[in-house]
Image (cartoon, helix red, strand yellow):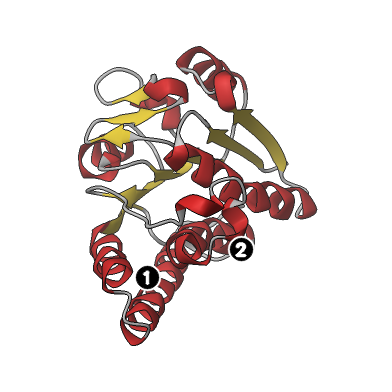
Amino acid sequence: MTELLITRPEHDDTTHYLSNWSKEIIDIAENKNIKVFDINREKAIKKNVELRLNKMSCDLTFFNGHGDFNVIGGHNNEPLIIGGENEGLLKSKIVYAISCKSAKELGPKSVKAGAISYTGFDDDFIFVYEPEKISRPLNDNTAKLFLEPSQLFMKSLIKGNSVREGVDKTKKLLADNFLKALNDNDRDSAKYLWWDLKHFVSHGDVDAKLQ
């Protein structure tokens, strides 16, 4: 059985949004008979992630959280995956990280350590949201411009598309939303959608698919 590990810390506004927007991925995966390990909130710490990655195959890993060039963060920004320390845990896995900058250095290191592919952002992932919608993030249409494309990559993989196809679909939706924001005279959103589009990258075998 295909396995998915997903981390969903929720300790600030950004991670609160990412976590809530990722819930649909869990439902879609389970409907495809994928076994899901959801490491949520205060459970999203290094010890728990390492234990799960060591114990199970977790063919697909999906990280949500803050990050840096060499780090994926979890609850309260505790480092989960650190380049030069434990990226070998990602061996034989298709990896997706909505974690700022991590695809710049950690991505290539993970592939060198045996990850099938690593997709994410090689600089900051930026999204605009409406503060009055913080308690109802799924109803935030401004955030939707950014978070719907970011989730599309995972949906594409789960539906059997290759990494390359998922990247292309995500970039197309970001580009479409960029034009929509321009037409709506929402220049802040347009600026950051273009930024995210430019910094969305993939390393490794882009022709890989879930088996």
Q: Residues within 10 Å of mark 1 (few under 14, many from 20)?
A: many
Question: Horizontally, is 171 left or right of 44 in the view?
Answer: left
Q: Is residue 92 visible?
A: no
Number of on-image labels: 2
The residue positioned 21% from the left and 36% from the top of the image is 69
Could you say whether the residue bearing mark 2 is in a helix, strand or loop? loop
**Label at residue 160:** 2
**Residue at figure coordinates x 46%, y 17% from the top left:** 46
Q: Residue furthest bottom?
A: 183
Amino acid at the residue labelled 2 = Gly
Q: Is 154 placed above or below 34 here?
A: below
**SS under mark 1:** helix
Residue 38: x and y in percent read 64, 33
Q: Is residue 200 visible?
A: yes
The mark lying in front, picked from 1 and 2, is 1
Residue 211 at x, y percent in the picture: 62, 52
Q: Nearer the viewer, residue 24 or 155?
A: 24
Could you tell me how far apart the alpha carbons at marks 1 and 2 are, in whole angstroms? 18 Å
Q: Is residue 211 left or right of residue 80?
A: right
Identity of the residue drawn at 29% across and 60% down: 196
Could you tell me which residue is drawn at 38 percent across and 59 percent down?
206
**11 sits to left or right of 107:** right
The answer to whether marks 1 and 2 mark residues whose Cβ atoms lie closer than 8 Å is no
Residue on which disc 1 sits: 171
Q: State left or right for residue 26 relative to residue 13.
A: right
Rendered-image quadrant of the N terminus: top right
Considering only vertical position in the picture, is 172 above or below 87?
below
Crowd class of label 2 (few under 14; some 14 to 19; many from 20; radius 10 Å): some
Of pointers 1 and 2, the one earlier in the residue sequence: 2
**Which one is in front, 64 or 211?**
64
The amino acid type, in three-letter code, at marker 1 is Lys
